[in-house]
Amino acid sequence: MALFADGGVMASKPYAASGAYINKMSNYCDRCRFDVAKKNGPKACPFNYLYWNFLIEHREKLGRNPRLAMPYRTLDKLTEERRSAIADDSRRFLKTLETQP
């Protein structure tokens, strides 16, 4: 997501990761209050649903990028219920960031 901040000028693929990848490649999840194994809900790792929400929100721009074909195929297999939970959890989490001092 960070490399997408420039609109894709410097990188052909936005570097975005779910909680599973972050957990596998670092020790950041060791003391986290969220559960990296949970995909949705208040105790779920925010990176899990924010990853999918990012792809959903930017599909028009990123959907034809060949380097993102596999994530978009996976996204297309998600049920409407799961997509709704992703959107709800993302809105809820991002709203908490807006209200922080």
Image: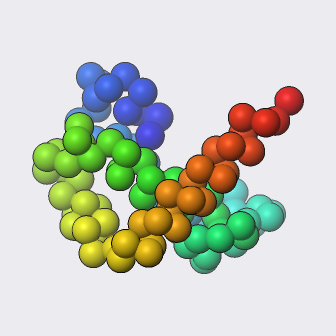
| Left or right of residue 66: residue 17 | right
| Rendered location of residue 51, percent (x, y) | 46, 55
Give the quadrant of residue 100. Answer: top right
The quadrant the N terminus occupies is top left
Across and down, in percent, residue 35 comes to 69, 72
Residue drawn where x is 28% and y is 29% of the image: 8
Query: How many numbered callouts?
Result: 0
Q: Nearer the viewer, residue 41 or 4?
A: 41
For the point 50% across and 63% down, the residue is 86
Q: Report whether 35 appears left or right of 71.
A: right
Q: Position of residue 43 (x, y in %)?
A: 72, 70
Tell me if residue 14 comes above or below residue 68 in the rendering.
above
Image quadrant in which you'd find residue 41: bottom right
Nearest the camera: 9 or 24? 9
Q: How is the image coloured?
A: rainbow
The quadrant of the rendering that contains the C terminus is top right
Is 76 left or right of 78, judged from the image as shown? left
At 47% from the left edge and 34% from the top edge, which residue is drawn? 2
Q: Is residue 79 visible?
A: yes
Q: Is residue 55 above or below residue 62?
A: below
Residue 81 on image: x %, y %:
44, 75
From this viewpoint, is residue 36 visible? Answer: no
Residue located at (69% from left, 57% from top): 28
